[in-house]
Image: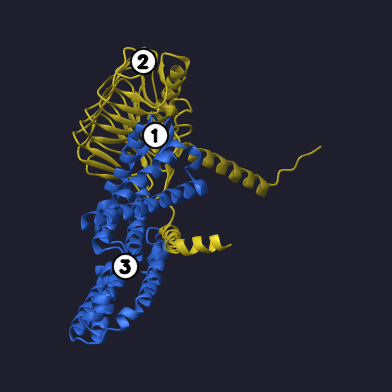
Amino acid sequence: MEVYYIPERRSRVKRFAALLVWSALSVGLNAQIALGPTVDTFGVLAGSTVTNSGPTVVLGNLGVSPGTAITGFTGIAPGGPGQVSGTINSANAFALQAQTELTAAYNAAAGAASTATVAGDIGGQTLLAGVYTSTSTLGITGTLTLNAQGNPNAQFIFQIGSALTTATGSAVLLINGAKASNVFWQMGSSATLGTTSTFAGNLLALSSISLGTGAVLQGRALARTGAVTLLSNTITAPAGLSGPPPPLVTPAPSSLILVFTALAGAGVYRSRKRLAKSFKFR
Amino acid sequence: MVEQWSTDEDMSHGFLVPIVILWVVWKDRERWRQLEPQPSWWGFALLAIGACMQFAAALGVGLFAGAVAFLVSIAGAVLCLGGFGWLRALAFPFVLGLFMLPKLAIVYNQATLPLQLLASRIAAGILTSAGIGVIREGNILDVGGHRVLVAEACNGIRYLLSLGFMAVVFGYLCDSKPWVRLAMLAAAVPVAIVANGARVAAAGWLPSIDAGVPHAVAGWLIFVACLAILVVLRHLFDKVYAHYQT
């Protein structure tokens, strides 16, 4: 059986193949980074130790692997003032799986195609979604604003060559639909959050993470090999694949219903004697 | 104002306020009919002030100024037609009219967050007192993994305005003394705030009533309980008054 190639059809096949390759590349370039389903449930994860002083609150799971030491938390010896809403995992299979997923997320963040370069101190700036690369250290003094421009899937990825340091009282502000779960800080070494600073996003550190006294983290502190050190902090793991469920909003019934009910009640109260009489009569 | 009543659930009671005002005016018709009309030129001054306020509102001062201008203009018209006697006789309907004014943005914006945090604190306190473990993170309550957000709409303003309005109306219906009416209005504030905290605590404690119809019914029942508290307080105030009279 002979096969005849028609030039026009061949050209269409080529164009279709090119489209497929372009689509695959586009998907690859714009790939969304996601934490694995296990590490997603963690508020704090360390490689060596988790150390806490003061009334820290972690909303999410807490764990360490391959290290074993967790100090300063209620529910694990020797105890302490720290509170964890989820489970505490010391070198168990759950923490190990979380570390495996953290490594994958860390590598994905590190390998994302850069869209802009940042350097020095990025406090006071407003950044849009993208992949920002800093070849050495990065600092935040004042407020850094991350603007999602109404896109709920907007991701902000920061590739930091060495350390991230935030100043006392600094803040990361999320606006226009930006989500803490979609912000990734990938550090070649460590992260240090200043005293009373307010930070948002997933801290993916190769070595250690330290939170200054009273610092608030809306996100996760995930260290691959080193320690996580906490000092009277609040860490809220944002809802992700299987993280804590989003909180339910609890508005009261509308004031029209409330006042209408109350007026009806007042009418009955005012006519109570007449009503009582009519019931007695019957 | 009507647009805000129809779009803002905190202010939707505004539709009922004019009806109550008209009913009060009709109920007291004998009293103000007996008054000899003594038109006053001061009414024109009030009308002028109302017009200026309306003009300023139209220029961009805001909806609140326009709504106040409406009340001021009505007061001016009453003064023009019937004088100070009529204005005094209709003072109570004017007080009720304050409850249909739109929220003053500058006050509302300042009060919202503190009220949200207060409701969260009260709810956490109620749950802790009941022996239920709760973690409060600002305006988020975590009760054993069940998370409840005390949002802007949950700040208690709705209970506060509704209960305040009803305290005034109830005081009027019961022919209470002016100081009893004022005391009831003052009592409505803490009652509404604590009731809102209790509502949030209930939503945190019982996941089955944290959304939808069960949640609305729970909120409604708590409001009914607030009304019962007001009735009890009114009797208490009357007894105190009678005690000091004797």
Q: Which residue is mark 3?
A: B96
Foreground: A119 or B157?
A: B157
Q: Which residue is mark 2?
A: A76
Cβ atoms at labels 3 and 2 below 8 Å apart = no
Q: Amino acid at mark 3?
A: Leu
* Callout 3 secondary element: helix
Q: Chain of mark 2?
A: A
Residue for point 39% across, 69% down: B20
* Callout 1 secondary element: strand
Using the rendered view, name the quadrant where residue B69 is placed: bottom left
Q: CA distance from mark 3 to mark 2?
A: 59 Å
Q: Amino acid at mark 2?
A: Ile
- Counting residues from the start of the chain, the first of labels 1 and 3 encountered is 3
Using the rendered view, name the quadrant where residue A228 is placed: top left
Mark 1 crowdedness (10 Å alpha carbons): few <14, some 14-19, many ≥20: many
Residue for point 67% across, 47% down: A9
The image shows residue A63 at horizontal and vertical percentages of 39, 19
Foreground: A66 or A27?
A: A66
Q: Relative to A22, is A108 on the left or the right?
A: left
Q: CA distance from mark 2 to mark 1?
A: 21 Å
The image shows residue B165 at horizontal and vertical percentages of 34, 61
Foreground: A82 or A47?
A: A82
Mark 2 crowdedness (10 Å alpha carbons): few <14, some 14-19, many ≥20: some
Q: Up-down: is A134 above or below B91?
A: above
Of discs 1 and 3, which sits in the foreground? 3
Q: Which residue is mark 1?
A: B142
Q: Relative to A184, is A101 on the left or the right?
A: right
- Label the yellow chain with its letter: A
